[in-house]
Amino acid sequence: MSRISTAKYNKHEQALSLLRKEFITYEEKEFIFANFHEGASNNNGKAGAFFTPLELAKQLPIFAPFPN
């Protein structure tokens, strides 16, 4: 996994700081989804962790069966 840019890392840090708040707005949630970078602080390649891209994750509930 390649390194992320300083700008992306700074946005990731901002997203993490928002997660520490007790309440967050809808716009803050959108910022977190857009700027959280799963590879910013962990070696996910060696750990075998893989993440679903946001656009695909948004579409998954369309195909998931509805619970009874």
Image (cartoon, grey):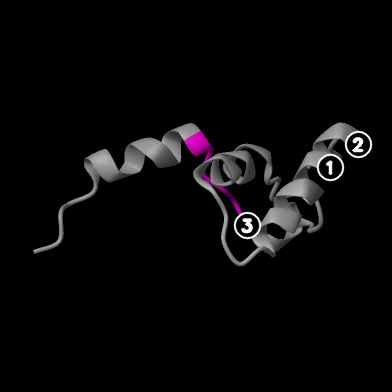
Q: Is mark 2 on a helix, strand or loop?
A: helix
Q: Is mark 1 on a helix, strand or loop?
A: helix
Q: Name above or below for residue 63 compared with residue 7.
A: below
Q: In this view, does 55 lie to the left or right of 68?
A: right
Q: Which of 9 and 42 is in front in this view?
A: 9
Q: Which residue lies furthest to the left in this view?
A: 68
Query: Could you say where residue 25 lies in the image, as x and y percent from the top left?
Result: 54, 49
Q: In which quarter of the image is residue 24?
A: bottom right
Quadrant of the frame with the C terminus: bottom left
Q: Name above or below for residue 45 compared with residue 63.
A: below
Residue at 63% of width from left, 57% of height from top? 49
Q: Is mark 3 on a helix, strand or loop?
A: loop
Task: Give the overall secondary structure of the magenta segment.
Answer: loop
N-term-proximal mark, 1 vs 3 = 1
Q: Name above or below for residue 34 compared with residue 32.
A: above
Q: Name above or below for residue 56 compared with residue 61.
A: above
Q: Name the residue under label 2.
A: 6
Disc 2 from disc 3: Cα separation: 22 Å
Q: Mark 3 points at which residue?
A: 49
Amino acid type at mark 1: Tyr
Which segment did they paint magenta?
49-54
Tag on residue 9? Answer: 1
Amino acid type at mark 2: Thr
